[in-house]
Amino acid sequence: MKLDSSISAVITGGASGLGAATARRLAAQGVKVGIFDLNADLGEALAKELGGVFCQVNVTSDEEVDAAFAKSRAAIGQERILVNCAGVGGSVKTVGRDRETGAIKQYPLANFERIIQINLIGTFRCIVKSSAGMLTLDPLEDGDRGAIVNTASVAAEDGQIGQAAYTASKAGIVGLTLTVARDLSSEGIRVNTILPGIFDTPLLASAPEPVRASLAAQVPFPKRLGRPDEYAQLALTMITCGYFNGEDVRLDGAIRMGPR
């Protein structure tokens, strides 16, 4: 897929971090961008910077997602590109003991459901809504109607202690990639997934410097946190390379996460 001003894109979780970096990369190629996010201040500012449109949306809501796609398409046209970056984390052991009393604590299932709803079902919801719109488009010269990039995590393969919900949600995204790519193959829509390692996102920006340095030291090479623009670089490769389809790709400096 050739990127230019005739192409529109939607980036969920696009107001900051990996999503914002991807929005900037796409806009630099002339692509019109729709930014989906809960953070209206950051989202509006980035949309203004890039000449795009911001849509405040909770990806767990059918109604909000439908309204966001309608608003984006009215402003910049039917998207050919969807990049799913919206997601949350969290760490709670499956069961554990209170350090002071020794009482047994169980994982709060409402929290498990929340993470699955946002990370996994929210991603799939946006895939369904976006690809349905892509089917209305004529194929480009290379046969592409659209390209979808999802965001999983190395936790999908190397889940650490306390990451049961997060790991399940991200492993689910990995698990659906090939199936959805096959589902959409006859319509010329490609689907790929990135599994980022430890990236310098807003979540880590607030961490103490010793914590950031310790995390960076765990990466075999280069010994630093990943840069959001490096995620965006791989996302654009997945979008523009017509033979890139049905793949789950780690982007992690060769790290393999330990139990903790």
Image: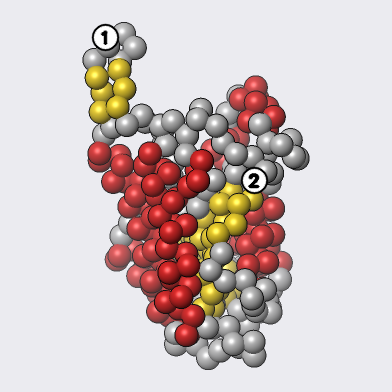
Q: Quadrant of the N terminus?
A: bottom right
- Mark 2 is surrounded, within 10 Å at the Cα level, by few (under 14), some (14 to 19) or many (20 or more) other residues, namely many
Q: Splitting the image into 4 quarters, where does residue 96 fall?
A: top left
Query: How many marks on residues?
Result: 2
Between 185 and 36, the residue placed more toward the observer is 185
Amino acid type, label 2: Asp
> Residue 65 at x, y = what percent?
36, 65
Asked whether the beta carbons under mark 1 and mark 2 sit within 8 Å of each other, the answer is: no
Residue bearing the label numbered 2 = 252
Compare marks 1 and 2 and give the one earlier in the sequence.
1
In what element is the residue under mark 1? loop
Q: Nearer the viewer, residue 138 or 10?
A: 138
Residue 21: horizontal and vertical position, in percent? 64, 55
Q: Which SS class for mark 2?
A: loop
Residue position marked by numbered label 1 in the rendering = 101
Quarter of the rendering containing residue 90: top left
Q: Amino acid at mark 1?
A: Thr
